[in-house]
Amino acid sequence: MKTNTITPFSTIHTLKNLLSKKKIDTKEIHDFYKERFKKYDNEIKSSLEIFEPVVAGENNNGLLGGIPGLIKDNICQKGKIISCASKILQNYKAPYDATVIERLKKEGAVIIGRANMDEFAMGSSTETSALFKTKNPWDFTKVPGGSSGGSAAAVAAGLVPFSLGSDTGGSVRQPAAFCGVVGLKPTYGLISRYGLIAYASSIDQIGIFSHTVFDNALVFSAISGFDEHDATTLKKEKYDYTKHLDGKLPENLTIGIVEEALYAEGMNNEIVAAIEQAISLFTKKNVTIKKIKLPMLSYTAACYFIISRAEAASNLARFDGIKYGYRTADAKNLKDIYLNSRAEGFGQEVQTRIMVGNYVLSAGHADEFYQHAKIVQSRLGDEFDNAFKSVDLLIMPTHPIPAFSFDTFEGNKLQMDLQDYFTCGINLAKIPAIQVPCGFTKSNLPIGMQLVGPQCSEELLFKVGHAFQQETDFHLKHPEKFK
């Protein structure tokens, strides 16, 4: 067998065709991608560990038979370290497989390793990882986005055809935009969170990175659906989300343009121009374009900060140096164990968010902050519901600026947090969105946009996103260094 039939940026769809025609075998695929990690990952550092041997799936004839994937390091893989890129869990091994891992294996996928991330998924640049920083494959001086930066960078560099991340306020879509790949944040409850180490349980969702919308739909078909282990999953049965991806837009499609988002203060002009060009393409395809206003959007960032940090403080209370994970060597009593283990084990960003979370939940402040944030969340959901009465989908920016340099916001944490401005509202409303590449800056950095739909509209999002990719070539462009 010759490996020259596999290219660095082969799609899952292409690899499956090559396998079915017996032009390649699964061992060739595994060897090919393992070699790419060895050759390139020392530079971009997308992975925390590449497994030797790889964890092979159970069914070579499954939806993902023989296809390698990289998994964000907050998703449990039985017997493998799951550190959340934190010192406090640096040697902890998962006792069980997350539901998504079970389903990937059942469909024949091969788990190739663990992806780097912002510590406990808290960050927008993968700079808060306790291990090392991941670089953007398009420009090594730029961040890949976060918190799922390792997962996005690995796909963008052609080190793996797909990866999983988690999205609490934009942590799949924003790095997908920075790295020029497709990123899905599904409807809350359509992918099981069982085995995902929680940041903010009510808005966390596992998401998917891929080169194409079609591949994304394929992986989603493999891992989505009801799970008896997760009480928050929706009662949706297994479904093939690729079956209607014919490259055609639905008839009588109406797309809304969120004015407060696209023309928000501080938006990068090149990003606005790229999205306007995408809108023009839809117009030429007889899509009805309607301007939409979402006044509550201006409150979503503050609302997200309060809810996510409150839930983080609660979820991370379990990491106390007693039950599992890191325990300080400097302790004379139980109080010392708690205080020193957490102070030494958690990074600065995590500690800050825990402190803020405890503050907004404290007596005298819970009504002032947390309860008001929940009211805003409810009203935001109503606003999206009303918008979808007049449009089928919405277009919004994924990011206000292109990938930025390391340490850009070192002295301005608020500006770093505001990188989630256009994405976090989707999580709060529990609706789906898919990020698709839609252009490049003059300095050759990727630009992305979000297609946003009502609950359980993934099939429509995939159909529209796939049709857009049949008319554009942004997803076919890759970083020169990795070709």
Image: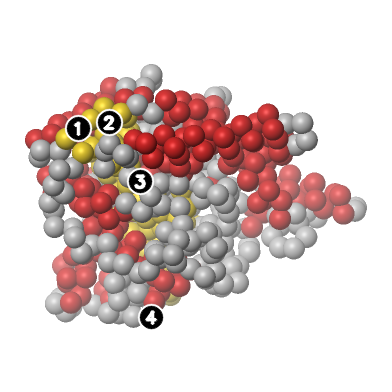
- The residues bearing labels 2 and 4 have C-alpha atoms spaced at a distance of 44 Å
Contact flag, marks 2 and 1 (Cβ < 8 Å): yes
Q: Could you say whether the residue bearing mark 1 is in a helix, strand or loop?
A: strand
Which one is in front in this view, the residue at disc 3 or the one at disc 2? Answer: 3
| Front residue of this view, candidates 313 and 374 | 374
- The residues bearing labels 1 and 3 have C-alpha atoms spaced at a distance of 17 Å
> Of label 1 and label 4, which has the lower sequence position?
4
Contact flag, marks 3 and 2 (Cβ < 8 Å): no
> Of label 2 and label 4, which has the lower sequence position?
4
> Of label 3 and label 4, which has the lower sequence position?
4
Which one is in front in this view, the residue at disc 3 or the one at disc 4? Answer: 3
Contact flag, marks 1 and 3 (Cβ < 8 Å): no
Q: Which residue is mark 3?
A: 454
Q: Could you say whether the residue bearing mark 3 is in a helix, strand or loop?
A: loop
> Of label 1 and label 3, which has the lower sequence position?
1
Q: Could you say whether the residue bearing mark 2 is in a helix, strand or loop?
A: strand
Q: Which residue is mark 4?
A: 58
Taking the spot 61% from the left edge, 51% from the top edge, the residue there is: 86
- The residues bearing labels 3 and 4 have C-alpha atoms spaced at a distance of 35 Å
- In the image, residue 153 lies at what x, y percent? 37, 49
Left or right: where 466 falls relative to 220: left
- In the image, residue 301 lies at what x, y percent? 50, 31
The N terminus sits in image quarter: bottom left
Amino acid of disc 1: Ile
Q: Which residue is mark 1?
A: 289
